[in-house]
Image (spheres, rainbow, N blue to C red):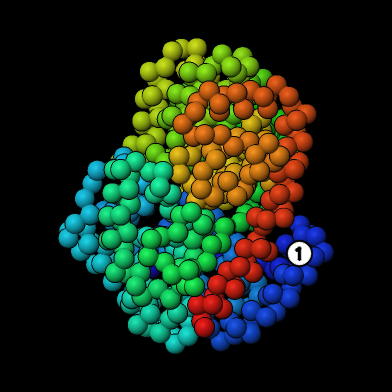
Amino acid sequence: MRTIDVAPLPLSELEPHLDEVAAHRLRDGVAAAQALLEGRALWIVTPTDQAGAGPVETVAPLAGYARGLDVDARWLCLDAPAEFTALSGRLHSWIHGDIGDRGRLGEKERDLYEHTLASNAENVAGDIREGDIVILHDPATAGLARPLKAAGAVVVWRCHAGADLATASPEGVEDAQRAWAFLDRYLEDADYVIVSCEEYRPPFTEPEACAVIPPSIDPDSPKNRVLDMDEAWSIARLAGIFDGEPPFDAFPFIRGDGRTDALRSAAAEGGVMRAGGPVPLGARTVTQVSRWDRLKGMKELAIAFAENLEALPDDAHLLLVGPCPDKRSAAERVLDEAVEAVELLPAAARSRIHIAAVPAHDREVNALVINAVQRVSSVVTQRSIVEAFGLTVAEAMWKKAPVVASGVGGIRTQVTDGVDGVLVDPHDGAAWAQAVADLLLFPERAAEMGATAHESVRRSFLPDRHLLQVLDALAAALE
Ligand code: UDP
């Protein structure tokens, strides 16, 4: 396994974002939990540390706050070959009831899974002491439960995926059941399970050993910190995603410390924009930011936009943004499918759809680009088919963007329809276009919705609530 550096985050940085009651609750809750964690290390394991995936975004601030509280928190990610990543990607999408990947989950796959995780476990098992806590994230790490428990740890498995099998297709239900059957034996050793959304609880969990805890966003991270509009436009243009001169060239991070070279050379070589070129000056942009996963419905979104062009104002453009995928990965195939679908559309639609793949190996640079793009967009959309929790939805709401999102899974707890965003049926393109058009045509209503959305996130989706709930879950796991 690989250790990821985590800088301590003092809770005092969070307090300016909280009202007095929430700040008080946080101080009290944390003081109680410190006693519980005293003398224990907290090991957090994610499949990867690459930008563009929910667990990474969720773990980074919580690990930072834990270290800020003097908890010995350590973040590790797996060392795994590409075949393992493909296999864990399959498990992940099958749990979602996805039917795109017809691959296998047989004995060969089990060998690969167990062999990879056994060598990762060996790496750390010797450093784990009796009573330490391990939080494993997602299907890729579930197989670590047994060896790390045997090393003396209390093991919590946190699953960010899931699907409402009552509404999945028969093939989707079958895939999900096969994925759970594959994971079942590894999860028997987990002392506690955390899921993001009530409806997506795994079939085997006992209610007393499972908590529903939605993730949160970090308001001070590069992804969410305040950028003024000049900064935001500068970054979005320097990244090559929007046309026009950067209005503000005094942003040192982007200008010249070497870290943004990959981004700037990708932009200069035209490697960021995969379809449609940069969004033109004067366009009003409807943006979706996602991983390249079929469950995010990127291709279907482009088609819905094209089929409902007449319902939308003439200057409305669609922008799909995701991380630059590894070569020959499943994500690259999904990105290519979206690009190919756009190429087949009539010219009138094609010229108004833009696809960007942003370099992701430098998390901070990637996060700043996403931050900027979310801020300069007129509407942010998340038209996922399944979603246990949409971090992108919370990020956009925090930035006061009007959001049009699928009324599925955890998104239904994030957005109150018509109040702080709009929920639509993910299979109804006309309803999606109408909702977007209404927000573009009535900017005052959109601004009001964005302001309400910001307050909703402040109340429910910042790390204070999240941290306290996770501490409660750890206390329950230790009982
Ligand atoms: N993201 C990113 N760079 C990208 C695309 C996505 O940093 O190019 C981030 C996005 O901002 C969000 C996370 O990846 O923080 C995705 O989390 P979400 O809950 O929306 O979906 P998941 O990937 O967990 O299914």
Count of marks overlaid on the render: 1
Residue 412, percent across and down? 58, 46
Residue at image coords 41%, 66%: 205
Residue 380, percent across and down? 61, 35
Amino acid beneath label 1: Ala
Q: Is residue 313 visible?
A: yes
Residue at image coords 56%, 28%: 432
Judge from the rendering whether residue 309 lies leftward or rightward of residue 463; answer left or right. left
Residue 309, percent across and down? 54, 16
* Residue situated in front as seen by the camera: 369 or 188: 188
Judge from the rendering whether residue 222 lies leftward or rightward of residue 84; answer left or right. right
Residue 297, percent across and down? 44, 35
* Residue situated in front as seen by the camera: 157 or 410: 410
State which quadrant residue 34 falls in: bottom right
- Which residue does the numbered mark 1 point to in the structure image? 22
Judge from the rendering whether residue 57 lies leftward or rightward of residue 275; answer left or right. right
Seen as rendered, the residue at the extreme front is: 166
Residue at image coords 29%, 49%: 175
* Residue situated in front as seen by the camera: 229 or 289: 289
Q: Relative to 140, does residue 473 appear above or below in the rendering?
A: below
Seen as rendered, the residue at the extreme left is: 107
Q: Relative to 215, does residue 68 appear above or below in the rendering?
A: below
* Residue situated in front as seen by the camera: 126 or 240: 126
Q: Residues within 10 Å of mark 1 (few under 14, many from 20)?
A: some
